Image (cartoon, helix red, strand yellow):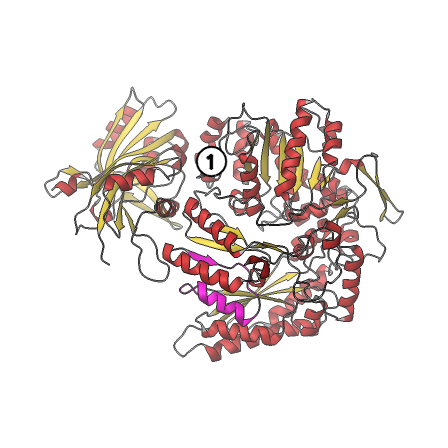
């Protein structure tokens, strides 16, 4: 199989995506290994290789004697054509074995616009699309990642979905599959066993009933032994969690092509639009020592020239100053640079950036998210205008000349005044740059990047409507005019892509038919501008008699039964509703790391707690 | 601290490395040097990079047994040690084959190279290839179309070819041609004249040479003995 694949390589773009043999890739004995799992990333090799979670699971599984993990990415369209011509199915990178020959195919659900690629990958692999069409000859098709908190549009395609942190549950899953294989259990019995594992959701054991208006009436279990609510898995102490001392180093340049260390998981800032900030609670920090050790190990084993300290908000790590200072000093001796992917909007964060980026001062990104204090209070983004100005002032003074500002439009309660606020903020930042940058220096550039707000499951805004496409376009046009200014660049996100994201983010099982139809029509790589075919998607909705606006534009009622009602991140629905009400009152909510408990219920219900290792417990 | 020693190494690019671009090979070697914890010298300036100087850029799609790189080290280490340490950390598809210590002063490797040898393995049937090659070599003008950034240009490459022969039993074309900063022929650009496509051949670089004023061909190692 591999030989045949090699023959088509000269004729495809970026053949090194498909060649394997990278440093630290595992090549385990196919015949000697009991459980074989393919880790499938529904996007290109370059995108997939930058995903840390994928690398962690790859490492954990391959550390087991009885299991192996191999990688597979979505082949680019030219490769798909060559595979079709040569009659080749989708194969795993390492062994070249067909995907269909694995025991488990595990997809990562990073974003809604990759759903079509999942269906397409099943097609390319020759695996029947629907769970109901598969039997014990076929692999189990499972999924995890942030979109697993509402995997309903994929419910018919998946055998199961895993909610929350994967480090522990992956072992339970592999153990269960091993024992099911040994006992030669039927597909149905295997799934019953899997449904018994906490955090594992088997969609086919849940029956959805709808009201006459098409809303969900009830979600009921069809088997007595399965839980009525699936609660996410959570690793209590990240210092104890397995972390790879080596990761696969690609030959070709990929996104995030550097050593990545996760300094903490979870964020309790409580931004009301942010799904990650809700579903990954509570905050669990790694100790300074652990982070430094893991960085050292990764740099030793990979030879990377850069290490990135990743998390949802690394600036909030309790001992960020100590960590950055110590690590940067150590790295400087090695000729390695340190990067912080997310910068908080304050001058303190800029000081850290100064500390680590002594030389390269290309650009700094800040995310005020909204243009006025009123709207920032609504979304609970606790950034004051003065903070931003102080931060950019410090940045310009320290030698940066390019600032990127990230905003969202279409947020609940938004008015035109909020858009004016975006323009004013950008103008003021530019003005600060002009004042601050010494004469003879480069001219300041402000890049304003604006995306459309998409309501996400499990957030206080899960009840909200997605802003009308026409209105969003008008807002973008308005902003574009307001920002027509020397020194300011404006970029807007594709409204139609956001619309589709909004439909699928809160979609239910009935969308599975649309998804299948869209793939039949040729939809794939929806996240790629050059491949996104909105017209074909709309055709698919029409063909299946499904109204996409019902999913995107409808404001949900307080007591609406959500498609993900039976899937829990531990954050209570009551808390989310309360937060929504506070949003409309313009009342902010504090961060439970520094202020009192906000009552989201994660700690109580999951038996965990914020763990600020950088803080007191460390010494 | 001054530069304490430099070494020249020859390495191969195997099947797995065939599709790795020069820029990616550069990055890969930089990382290998770090993994091997060699005391490499770094460039000064905004983003320090390890001091590695390559002889040539290998076109994407080729294998090779004749790639050369000069390494500047901060402390003295002999070339065997450098070679062994690098080989222990290299990924599949790349291997260091030989090395030599460099004198204190030496010219930039890339500026020296004038010539390369290629073995072009023909995969399918090519019955008239032998005659075709004889015919080509008898001409004093060989025009090819070279595409460079949206522009197409007619170029006469006859003077760039030292020798072109076909080894029928091995089904292999042996090509020796100009390679380097002064004049350069990419072996794949020759294929249309031979009636071959990219998918019909496997190209391997077997030597990189330096032509002396006396008309002799030396390897980058030989030149050190002069």
Residue furthest top as drawn: B169
Quarter residue B190 falls in: top left
Q: Position of residue B9 (x, y in %)?
A: 26, 41
Look at 53% across and 39% down and name the residue there.
A59
Q: Secondary structure at mark 1?
A: loop
Front-most of B69 and B205?
A: B69
In the displayed structure, does residue A282 sit left or right of residue A76?
right
Look at 73% across and 61% down and name the residue there.
A467
In the displayed structure, does residue A452 sit left or right of residue B164?
right
Q: Is residue A349 inside the magenta stretch?
A: yes
Residue B209 visible somewhere in the drawing: yes
As displayed, is residue A138 above or below residue A436?
A: above
Residue furthest right as drawn: A212
Q: Which residue is mark 1?
A: A20
Quarter residue B95 falls in: top left
Residue B67 visible somewhere in the drawing: no
Residue furthest left as drawn: B214
Q: Position of residue B96 (x, y in %)?
A: 30, 37
Front-most of A143 and A162?
A: A162
Q: Is residue A432 inside the magenta stretch?
A: no
Front-most of A352 and A129?
A: A352
Q: Position of residue A180 (x, y in %)?
A: 69, 26
Q: Magenta residues, as a range?
A: A337-362
As displayed, is residue A124 above or below residue A533?
A: above
Task: Determine crowd level at label 1: few under 14, some 14-19, many 20+ residues with C-alpha closer than 10 A.
Answer: some
As displayed, is residue A110 above or below residue A271?
A: above
Quarter residue A173 falls in: top right
Quarter of the rendering occupied by the C terminus of chain A: bottom right
Q: Chain of mark 1?
A: A
Q: How many marks?
A: 1
Front-most of A165 and A70?
A: A165
Q: Position of residue A8 (x, y in %)?
A: 47, 32
């Amino acid at each position: 199989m591999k030989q045949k694949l090699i023959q088509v390589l000269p004729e495809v773009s970026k053949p090194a995506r498909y060649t394997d043999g990278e440093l630290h890739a595992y090549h385990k004995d196919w015949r000697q290994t009991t459980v074989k799992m393919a880790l499938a990333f529904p996007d290109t090799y370059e995108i997939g290789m930058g995903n840390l979670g994928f690398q962690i699971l790859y490492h954990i599984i391959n550390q087991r004697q009885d299991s192996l993990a191999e990688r597979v990415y979505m082949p680019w369209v030219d490769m798909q054509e060559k595979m079709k011509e040569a009659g080749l199915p989708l194969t795993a990178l390492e062994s070249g074995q067909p995907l269909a020959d694995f025991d488990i195919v595990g997809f990562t659900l990073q974003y809604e616009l990759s759903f079509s690629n999942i269906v397409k990958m099943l097609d390319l692999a020759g695996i029947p699309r629907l769970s109901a069409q598969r039997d014990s000859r076929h692999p189990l098709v499972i999924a995890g990642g942030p979109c697993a908190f509402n995997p309903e549009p994929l419910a018919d395609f998946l055998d199961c979905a895993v909610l929350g942190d994967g480090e522990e549950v992956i072992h339970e899953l592999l153990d269960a599959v091993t024992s099911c294989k040994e006992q030669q259990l039927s597909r149905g019995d295997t799934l019953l066993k899997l449904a018994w594992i906490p955090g594992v959701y088997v969609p086919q054991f849940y029956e959805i009933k709808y009201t006459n208006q098409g809303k969900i009436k009830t979600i009921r279990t069809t088997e007595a032994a399965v839980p009525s609510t699936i609660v996410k898995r959570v690793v209590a102490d990240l210092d104890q969690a397995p972390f790879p001392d080596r990761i696969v180093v690609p030959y070709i340049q990929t996104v995030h092509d550097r050593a990545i260390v996760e300094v903490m998981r979870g964020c309790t800032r409580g931004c009301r639009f942010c799904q990650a900030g809700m579903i990954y609670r509570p905050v669990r920090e790694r100790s300074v020592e652990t982070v430094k050790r893991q960085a050292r190990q990764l740099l030793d084993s990979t030879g990377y020239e850069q290490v990135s300290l990743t998390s949802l908000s690394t600036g909030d790590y309790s001992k960020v100053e100590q960590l950055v200072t110590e690590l940067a000093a150590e790295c400087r001796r090695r000729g390695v640079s340190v990067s912080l992917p997310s910068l908080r909007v304050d001058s303190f964060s800029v000081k850290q950036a100064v500390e680590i980026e002594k030389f390269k001062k290309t650009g700094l990104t800040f995310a005020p998210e909204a243009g006025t204090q009123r709207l920032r209070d609504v979304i609970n983004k606790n950034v004051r205008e003065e903070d931003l100005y102080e931060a950019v002032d410090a940045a310009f003074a320290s030698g940066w000349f390019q600032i990127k500002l990230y905003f969202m439009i279409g947020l609940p309660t938004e008015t035109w005044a909020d858009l004016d606020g975006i323009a004013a903020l950008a103008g003021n930042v530019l003005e600060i740059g002009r004042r601050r940058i010494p004469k003879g220096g480069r001219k300041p550039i402000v890049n304003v990047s604006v995306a459309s707000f998409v309501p996400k499951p499990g957030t206080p805004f899960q009840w909200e409507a997605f802003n009308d496409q026409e209105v969003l376009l008008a807002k973008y046009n308005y902003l574009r005019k307001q920002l027509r200014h020397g020194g300011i660049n404006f970029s807007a996100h594709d409204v139609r892509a956001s619309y589709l994201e909004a439909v699928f983010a809160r979609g239910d099982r009935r969308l599975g038919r649309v998804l299948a139809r869209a793939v039949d029509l040729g939809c794939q790589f929806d996240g790629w501008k050059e491949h996104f075919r909105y017209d074909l998607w709309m055709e698919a909705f029409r063909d299946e008699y499904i109204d996409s606006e019902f999913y995107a534009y409808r404001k949900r009622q307080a007591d609406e039964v959500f498609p993900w009602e039976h899937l829990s991140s531990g954050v209570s629905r009551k808390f989310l509703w309360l937060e929504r009400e506070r949003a409309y009152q313009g009342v902010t909510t504090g961060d439970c790391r520094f202020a009192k408990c906000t009552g989201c219920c994660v700690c109580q219900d999951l038996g965990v707690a914020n763990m600020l290792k950088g803080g007191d417990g460390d010494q | 601290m001054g530069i304490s020693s430099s070494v020249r190494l020859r390495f191969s690019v195997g099947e797995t490395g065939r599709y790795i671009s020069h820029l990616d090979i550069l990055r890969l070697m930089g990382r290998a040097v770090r993994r091997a914890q060699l005391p490499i010298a770094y460039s000064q300036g905004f983003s320090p990079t390890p001091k590695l100087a390559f002889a040539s850029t290998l076109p994407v799609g080729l294998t090779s047994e004749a790639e050369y790189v000069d390494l500047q080290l901060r402390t003295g280490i002999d070339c065997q040690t450098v070679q062994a340490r690098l080989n222990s950390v290299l990924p599949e598809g790349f291997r260091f084959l030989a090395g030599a210590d460099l004198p204190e002063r030496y010219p930039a490797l890339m500026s020296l190279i004038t010539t390369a040898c290629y073995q072009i393995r023909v995969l399918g049937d090519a019955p008239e290839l032998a005659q075709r090659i004889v015919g080509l070599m008898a001409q004093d003008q060989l025009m090819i179309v070279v595409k460079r950034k949206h522009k197409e240009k007619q170029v006469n490459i006859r003077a760039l070819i030292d020798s072109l022969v076909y080894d029928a039993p091995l089904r292999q074309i042996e090509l020796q041609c100009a390679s380097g900063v002064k004049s350069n022929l990419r072996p794949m650009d020759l294929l249309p004249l031979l009636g071959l496509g990219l998918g019909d051949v496997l190209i391997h670089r077997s030597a990189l040479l330096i032509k002396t004023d006396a008309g002799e061909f030396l390897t980058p190692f030989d030149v050190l003995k002069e």
